[in-house]
């Protein structure tokens, strides 16, 4: 198979676009397309300061690489979750982020959960019995809180995450299976800023997971190959596998699913089912971040409990 | 047992799968219930498109791209 642009040997074929490219044209194509998506969804401008949430994985590091290649002012935020899983998962992830940032002279902020909050995520999840034996619930809630606080406190205009189309399609698939109308009303490439909540953007939301991995490989970006040890068996993985089965037989299924949803949403399909509490946010009396119900936010409540229970065990 | 020289191999996260040479990577993946969408095929560090035909003795390293550890084989038959 040959590159459509130069007729040299192709290294990737994107069947949904009927487009095959060589390494050189592919590593140009990804930033070009990213810039197109940034403009199409009005994510941010040249003057904006961007905080990229980096996990050490292929998507977030590739995103940071692309944004800096495009000339944006983008700093990184790594959250050390304290997950070992027998492979030193968090240590490995942090190391990849640090190496990436150092090699490019980029600013990486590191937030260590155990140091700052008193316990690593798995221990915290165990102590509050939240999430049915999996730390993912405490982890997700904590990461969202920490990322927002870091972006707001640091004066950033946007928080960028490396979500790819497979992530978005799997989330959409789950929300559709459960007819989770509040979530369906909210999903998209941009989550607008509200009082105390930074604007969130997903510049890679139209790239297949395979494409971000290919970019990372071709750009020689070292990333943590093993995914989080707690993600195995997760529902989102099952949804991705199911969608890939369809994609294998009918190229473009995932992209069409996501873009059709965005088009329907753009035409007001979920307007009436938008989060009814969206306009009623209250500042948490402890941390000041917005929360939907008056009183302490879930993050402060959870971590207060973690510290109380840890103290009892000492 | 010594394999004949017409065999090629796919390697995914430490698992090694035998396939006859001459078939395309896509067909080889499908033979072992590996979703072509979930991996990138490489030979000696070079990325390959899935229409590439396997040569005898080829060892194709598959880079898993789907999040979630060893979850790249789907719906094994």
Image (cartoon, rainbow, N blue to C red):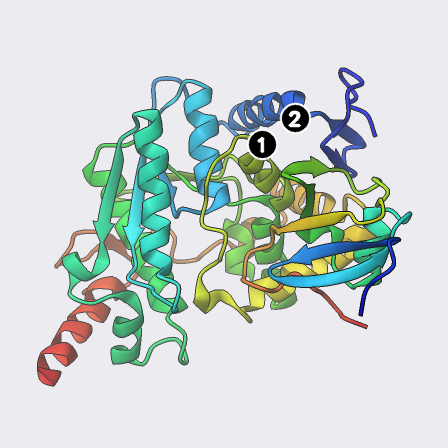
Q: Image check: A79 left or right of B69?
A: left
Q: Nearer the viewer, residue A244 or A192?
A: A244
Question: For the point 83% across and 58% down, which residue is it?
Answer: B19
Farthest bottom residue in view: A313
Residue B12 can be seen in this image:
yes
Question: For the point 19% across and 73% down, which residue is it?
Answer: A306
Cβ atoms at labels 1 and 2 below 8 Å apart: yes
Question: For the point 15% across and 55% down, which residue is it?
Answer: A287
Chain letter of the residue carrying label 2: A
Q: In 3D space, how far apart are the residues under numbered discs 1 and 2 (Cα atoms)?
A: 7 Å
In the displayed structure, A154 sits above or below A305; it is above
Residue A179: image quadrant is: bottom right
Q: Quadrant of the N terminus of chain A?
A: top right
Q: Position of residue B2 (x, y in %)?
A: 81, 65
Q: Position of residue A175 (x, y in %)?
A: 58, 61
Chain letter of the residue carrying label 1: A
| First in residue order: circle 1 vs circle 2 | 2
Determine crowd level at label 2: few under 14, some 14-19, many 20+ residues with C-alpha closer than 10 A. Answer: many
Residue A157 can be seen in this image:
no
Q: Are marks 1 and 2 on the same chain?
A: yes
Residue underneath mark 2: A23
């Amino acid at each position: 198979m040959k590159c459509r642009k130069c007729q040299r040997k192709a290294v990737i074929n994107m069947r949904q676009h009927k487009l095959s490219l060589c390494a050189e044209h592919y590593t140009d194509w990804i930033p070009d397309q990213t810039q197109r998506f940034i403009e199409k969804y009005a994510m941010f401008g040249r003057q904006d300061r961007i905080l990229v949430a980096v996990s050490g994985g292929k998507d977030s590091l590739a995103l940071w690489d692309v944004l800096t290649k495009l000339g944006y002012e983008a700093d990184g935020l790594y959250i050390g979750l304290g997950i070992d899983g027998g492979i030193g998962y968090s240590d490995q992830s942090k190391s990849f982020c640090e190496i990436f940032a150092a090699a490019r002279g980029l600013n990486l902020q590191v937030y260590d959960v155990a140091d700052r909050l008193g316990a690593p995520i798995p221990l915290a999840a165990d102590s509050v019995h939240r999430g049915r034996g999996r730390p993912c619930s405490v982890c997700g809630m904590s990461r969202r809180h920490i990322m927002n606080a870091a972006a707001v406190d640091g004066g950033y205009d946007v928080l960028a995450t490396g979500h790819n189309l497979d992530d978005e399609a799997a989330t959409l698939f789950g929300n559709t299976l459960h007819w989770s109308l509040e979530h369906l009303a909210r999903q998209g490439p941009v989550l607008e800023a509200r009082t105390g909540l930074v604007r969130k953007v997903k510049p890679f939301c139209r790239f297949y997971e395979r494409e971000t991995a290919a970019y990372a490989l071709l750009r020689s970006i070292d990333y943590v190959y093993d995914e989080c040890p707690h993600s195995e068996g997760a529902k989102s993985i099952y949804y991705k596998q199911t969608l890939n089965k369809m994609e294998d037989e009918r190229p473009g299924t995932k992209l069409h699913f996501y873009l059709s949803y965005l088009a329907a949403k753009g035409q007001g399909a979920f307007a009436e089912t938008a989060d009814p509490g969206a306009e009623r946010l209250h500042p948490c009396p402890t941390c000041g971040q917005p929360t939907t119900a008056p009183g302490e936010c879930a993050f402060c409540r959870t971590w207060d409990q973690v510290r109380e229970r840890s103290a009892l065990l000492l | 047992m010594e394999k004949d020289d017409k065999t090629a191999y796919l390697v995914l996260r430490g698992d090694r799968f035998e396939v006859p040479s001459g078939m395309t990577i896509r067909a080889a993946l499908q033979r072992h219930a590996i979703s072509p969408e979930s991996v990138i095929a490489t030979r000696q560090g070079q990325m390959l498109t899935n229409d590439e035909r396997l040569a005898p003795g080829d060892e194709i390293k598959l880079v898993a791209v789907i999040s979630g550890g060893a979850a790249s084989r789907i719906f094994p038959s």
